[in-house]
Amino acid sequence: MDAQEIRKSAALEKKHWWYAERRGLVRRLVRPLPAGRALDVGCGGGGNTGVLRDLGWDVTGIEYSPVAAGIARGRGLKVVRGDAQCLPVADASMDLVMSTDAWEHIEDDKAVARETARVLRPGGRALVAVPCSMALWSGHDVALGHLRRYERADLAALLEGAGLKVVDISSWNVLLRPVARLRRKNNDSESEMEEVHPVLNAGLRAAVATERFLPVQRLPGISLVARAVKR
């Protein structure tokens, strides 16, 4: 992702429906866990890093982009510049490693999975969110610097191959997948991350929030969310 796209995403992060609901998802999944030491790998502007901090975690963001790292630091977060393929962290030192929408940007995602497993203590948790299904590939992915979108079986194999035991892989943003697919059909080169009218923004947030109460987590969505544990 280029610097302009990073700054645009950071500016949208506080109110945009997608970022807001993703923070809510992270909060719901992490809240039941006892707080400890955490990494947010590929933390971007730090929206989800802040969620972990507010839940009582001793969290450090790892970010490759100097622009994104600077934005996150400006928000009062602890951030280290580093490569997800070679984390600057000791073996078995973390209770939680989280990566939200980062792995799809990295050429060697197997190395990222191995590094995630390496730095987790036995019994430590991984939380990974990635874009789902190459059927949705479009100019949006190109604009954001994605190298791939993931199928459920491929993500499970990636995590298991690194020595992590998959607890669950669920779909997220299921109800809006038909809308995304229709919109992306004719999208050659543009990111969808843009300012949304407040009324539409509220409606989209409500659509995603509704999924919490519906049995749709096994249906195809826009994202996949994996939870795994270090063996």
Image (tube, helix red, strand yellow):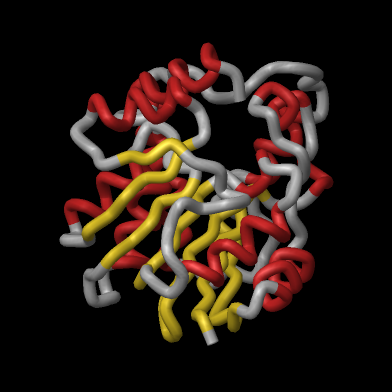
| Image vertical order of residue 184 relative to residue 181, above or below | above
Q: Residue at x 23, y 76 (%)?
A: 34
Camera-side residue of 167 and 57 = 57
Indicate the quadrant containing the N terminus: top left, top right, bottom left or bottom right.
Answer: top right
Residue 183 percent location from the top left of the image: 71, 28
Residue 228 position, x and y percent, is 53, 75
Total numbered labels placed on residues in the image = 0
* Residue 195 left/right relative to 103: left
Relative image position of residue 72 (x, y in whole percent): 32, 31
Measuring from the top left, give residue 107's x and y in whole percent: 75, 43
Name the quadrant containing residue 145: top right
120, above or below 132, in the image: below
x 16%, y 61%: residue:
56
Residue 204 in sight in this render: no
- Decide if residue 151 is on the left or right side of residue 127: right
Residue 7 appears in which quarter of the rendering?
Answer: top left
Residue located 30% across and 58% down the image? 27
Q: Is residue 188 left or right of residue 92?
A: right
The residue at the point 76 percent across, 60 percent down is 151
Visible in this render: residue 145?
yes
Dividing the image into 4 quarters, which one contains the C terminus? bottom right
Residue in front for this viewpoint, 179 or 91: 91
Foreground residue, 56 or 81? 81
Question: Does residue 186 sit above or below 126 in this rendering?
Answer: above
Q: Residue furthest top?
A: 4
